[in-house]
Amino acid sequence: MQPDPKQGERDYFARIGPAGIAHSVGKPFSDDNCAQYLAALTALFGLLAPPPRRIVEFGCGTGWLALCLAQRGYDVLGVDISEDAVAHARATRDARGLTRADFVAADYEAFATTAPFDYAIFHDSLHHAEDERAALACAWRALTPDGVAITLEPGAGHHDSVTSQRAIREFGVHEKDMPPRHIVRLAREVGFRRWLVLPHPHDLTRSFYRRAYHAAATPFELFSRRCLGTLRALRRMFATRNHGLVVLWK
């Protein structure tokens, strides 16, 4: 029998231990990348039409993003291949009394629904796919005729990072590069007709809101660092080929 190429993803949340689960459930505030996660959430709220809308989040993990969206008033279905992750997501939902979120343990590369969604979201999850083209095809099928998919994924170089290589060794998970150009190419192949690539939200916020301002001793230094932040922001706006947020219209 051939080994299951997705076993690492299936077992991940069963292997990270109580501290790892507490960290995952506590996101975004438990994570060192809290500012990055909150910037992504702000961008999503800016892109999404106001509730009520139906949203499916593919690769939801223990559900922190899905629960934030449900708290805002969206009807959300979180899909994850890990039964352990889904169990923790449901427990957190029930503890918070959030009735608009539901969770299902399923492979998002083979997911099917009879009730279409207005939005499909991949947040730091598409790069864990065995077949990202199949995952995007599932998103296309899950959407209403005018539905929208949104991806926020790590870009070029992610696979080779120290953190990714450690996760591959320890847990056997997929850690792929997922730059916008790759996502757009596959999305076009599965039927998405329009797309827009935007800077990753945190790339813009960190260009302006920086701890370095505190070290500025004079008004000129403050002005210089603000100008530098503007230049960084402009550079990142035109550097979305390798890293960015992708909006896909069905």
Image (cartoon, rainbow, N blue to C red):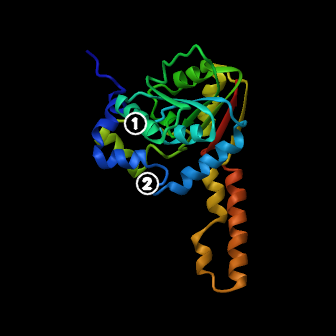
Query: In this image, 245 relative to 159: left or right?
Result: right
Query: In this image, 188 relative to 177: left or right?
Result: right
Q: Quadrant of the N terminus?
A: top left
- Residue shown at 36% from the left, 48% from the top: 22
Location of residue 173 in the rendering, given as x and y in whole percent from the top left corner: 37, 36
Instruction: Identify the element where label 1 is drawn.
Output: helix
Query: In this image, 45 relative to 138: left or right?
Result: right
Q: Is residue 191 visible?
A: yes
| Proximity of marks 1 and 2: CB atoms separated by less than 8 Å | no
Location of residue 180 in the rendering, given as x and y in whole percent from the top left corner: 62, 38
The residue closer to the viewer here, 159 or 141, is: 141
Q: Is residue 172 visible?
A: no
Indicate which disc residue 91 carries. 1
Location of residue 199 in the rendering, given as x and y in whole percent from the top left corner: 67, 48
Residue type at tag 1: Ala
Q: Quadrant of the C terminus?
A: top right
